[in-house]
């Protein structure tokens, strides 16, 4: 039988788990960081031990679309009221993109019941990874964009044609969102083409991680992405557009000592029954134009009458 009182055995077991595990003291300084935490966040043990967890475990967004602040962090609440907290949130990967996780924070107590710190476990949630996408993953040069690793314009358009036919036959609603990276030309002029491609890749990764597994994301134009949101009405599309905008602007890369980030504008609409693709794309483009004309860093969704 295993000696469960042996601290070294327990530590070795925790360190090897692929579930992320992080322990902090009352001041939220990190004292434990396992293999799973390294894999999910990109941060190695030697980079995080002794540091304030807010610098590393940057919880960016709740599943219910509300931003998380310092006072509503699950770790803080668990230590404050001594109760277990669970949340579906996004963490910030070292490479700059958002990672969707299921998170659980548990207070750590001494023999007298006093809270000494907290332990947080987290596992990555399923996202729209090309490996899991039901339509398969095209190869570079044959439908996949080399910069963002997303389906390219031609593949995205073909997918949209097929989806419109399927939706009209089965009366399944879906939403369309066009996401534009603001001022990409200015970033290119200031920092160069490689920097612009780097930020596009990070934004693409974040957007892909922000969608459900059955949603679709492709590169539409040089500075634009097209997202197809499955089985979606007006209200859900508005919430999705806001989530994409919020998470995309938290994407960042380090470039020759500078931290580069961008904002995005989002325009979208819901498919009308029997609507041709040209009108759907035109209405989506009009929504994006409205967002841009109002200063950008905004989402505009043109609502359509809900089907009974």
Image: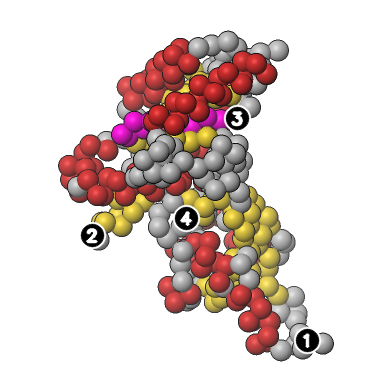
Is tag 3's residue or tag 1's residue first in the polypeptide sequence? 1
Is tag 1's residue or tag 2's residue first in the polypeptide sequence? 1
Which residue is label 2 attached to? 256
In the rendered structure, find residue 23 and report the number of the disc placed on it: none
Residue extent of the magenta highlight: 220-229
Q: How many angstroms separate mark 3 from mark 2 (CA)? A: 40 Å
Residue beneath the point at 39% across and 48% down: 202
Is tag 3's residue or tag 2's residue first in the polypeptide sequence? 3
Question: Taking 135 as reference, is 144 left or right?
Answer: left
Question: Taking 218 as reference, is 83 left or right?
Answer: right
In the rendered structure, find residue 230 and report the number of the disc placed on it: 3
Q: How many angstroms separate mark 4 from mark 1 (CA)? A: 37 Å
Residue 10 image offset from top left, x and y in percent: 68, 82
Q: Secondary structure at mark 1?
A: loop
Which residue is label 1 attached to? 2
Q: How many angstroms separate mark 1 from mark 2 (CA)? A: 50 Å
Q: Nearer the viewer, residue 178 or 274?
A: 274
Judge whether residue 278 is colored magenta. Answer: no
Determine whether 50 is above or below 214 in the image. Answer: below
Judge whether residue 224 is colored magenta. Answer: yes
Where, quadrant-wise, is the N terminus in this rendering?
bottom right
- Mark 1 or 2: in front is 1
Residue beneath the point at 60% across and 76% down: 15
Q: Secondary structure at mark 3?
A: strand
Residue beneath the point at 19% across and 47% down: 192
Is tag 4's residue or tag 3's residue first in the polypeptide sequence? 4
- For the residues labelled 3 and 2, say whether their Cβ atoms are less than 8 Å apart: no
In the rendered structure, find residue 92 and report the number of the disc placed on it: 4
């Amino acid at each position: 039988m295993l000696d469960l009182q042996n601290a070294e055995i327990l530590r070795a077991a925790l360190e090897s788990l692929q579930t992320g595990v992080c322990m902090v003291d009352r001041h939220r300084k990190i004292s434990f960081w396992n293999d799973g935490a390294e894999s999910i966040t990109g941060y190695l043990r030697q980079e995080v031990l002794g540091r304030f967890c807010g610098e590393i475990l940057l919880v960016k967004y709740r599943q219910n679309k509300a931003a998380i602040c310092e006072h509503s962090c699950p770790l803080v609440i668990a230590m404050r009221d001594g109760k277990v907290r669970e949340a579906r949130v996004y963490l910030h990967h070292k490479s700059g993109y958002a990672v969707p996780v299921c998170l659980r924070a548990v207070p750590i107590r001494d023999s007298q019941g006093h809270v000494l710190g907290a332990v947080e476990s987290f596992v990555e949630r399923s996202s729209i990874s090309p490996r899991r996408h039901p339509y398969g993953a095209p190869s570079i040069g044959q439908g996949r964009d080399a910069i963002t690793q997303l389906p390219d314009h031609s593949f995205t358009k073909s997918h949209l044609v097929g989806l419109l036919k399927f939706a009209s036959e089965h009366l399944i609603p879906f939403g369309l969102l066009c996401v534009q990276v603001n001022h990409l030309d200015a970033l290119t002029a200031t920092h160069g083409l490689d920097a612009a491609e780097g930020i596009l890749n990070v934004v693409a990764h974040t957007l892909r991680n922000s969608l459900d597994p059955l949603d679709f994301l492709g590169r539409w134009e040089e500075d634009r992405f097209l997202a197809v949101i499955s089985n979606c009405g007006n209200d859900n599309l508005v919430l999705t557009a806001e989530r994409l905008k919020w998470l995309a602007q938290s994407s960042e890369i380090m470039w020759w000592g500078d931290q580069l980030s961008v904002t995005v504008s989002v325009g979208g609409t819901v498919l009308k029954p029997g609507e041709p693709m040209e009108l759907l794309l035109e209405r989506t483009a009009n929504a994006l134009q409205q967002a841009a004309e109002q200063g950008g860093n905004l989402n505009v969704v043109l609502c359509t009458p809900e089907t009974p």
